[in-house]
Amino acid sequence: MAHHHDQQHKMTVGMWKECWNTPNVAFHNPNLNELFIKYHDKMLTRPGMRIFVPLCGKAVEMKWLVDQGHKVVGLEAAPVPCKAFFEENNIPYKIHEMKGIHGEKYESLDHNVVIYCCDFFLFSKDVCGEIDGIWDSGGLNSMDVEDQDKYIHRIRSLMGKGCVNLTEFVNFDKSIVDITWSMTKEELEREFGEGFKVEDITQMDAPKRLKDQSCDSLTLFAITKT
């Protein structure tokens, strides 16, 4: 794999959309995320919360959250997984054109799930309302280093008081891949800034599915708006 800062190999929205056009998308996990299973209680502090899932794909955690009585707000750049999420889970939905920012809104008929298909960096509280919790298992992790502060600024602006943002990083095997997408607790504290508390929850060995992609461990942080 190329060095992370090699601009020729930077993941673009076009490349992301193209990935979703292939039959077996390597980064889609058909099972609930291991860290989500263990630590979702840190985020889910009361019934009926609105949980944001950035760069969501067709994440199975979204269906689990809805089944537990929460509402889900997803954001995705590619239309393929938006449709697939609703169709594979047999959830009736409608597609609405979005005003203001270019894109589409995929919404279940019962209004419990909405996935916005648009540019993340144009997304705001004005579009989706205030968020009670965030499950970020690929959004910040997929940002190039030079885009991470911009991404965090956008996430910060969506978080309501008491909102807990569970952020997972995949750590690559340094002997194989020279990539530093991960951030430390200190870096997250600096980027989120005043009014946010960062807790380093755990680090665990990557499951086999990810070890096959040169990943060696997973790290989970809880970032709370105080």
Image (cartoon, rainbow, N blue to C red):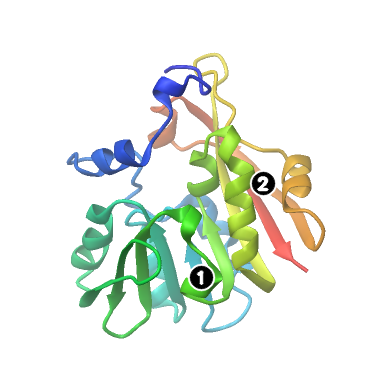
Looking at the image, residue 174 lies above or below residue 94:
above
The percent position of residue 79, horizontal first and vertical second, equals 25, 55
Q: Nearer the viewer, residue 68 or 195?
A: 195
Q: Quadrant of the N terminus?
A: top left
Picture quadrant of residue 113 = bottom left
The answer to whether residue 12 shows anywhere in this view is: yes
The answer to whether residue 54 shows anywhere in this view is: no
Q: Is residue 73 left or right of residue 109?
A: right
Amino acid type, label 2: Thr
Residue 51, disc: 1
The residue drawn where x is 48% and y is 62% is 123
Q: Nearer the viewer, mark 2 or mark 1?
A: 1
Amino acid type, label 1: Ile
Residue 113, disc: none
The percent position of residue 156, horizontal first and vertical second, equals 65, 60
The residue drawn where x is 77% and y is 48% is 189
Looking at the image, residue 209 lies above or below residue 159:
above
**Which class describes the residues within 10 Å of circle 1: few (<14), some (14-19), or many (20+)?**
many
Q: Residue lying furthest top in this view? A: 175
For label 2, the SS is strand
The residue drawn where x is 43% and y is 72% is 72
Residue 202, disc: 2
Q: Quadrant of the C terminus?
A: bottom right
Q: Is residue 208 left or right of residue 95?
A: right
Cα separation between marks 2 and 1: 21 Å
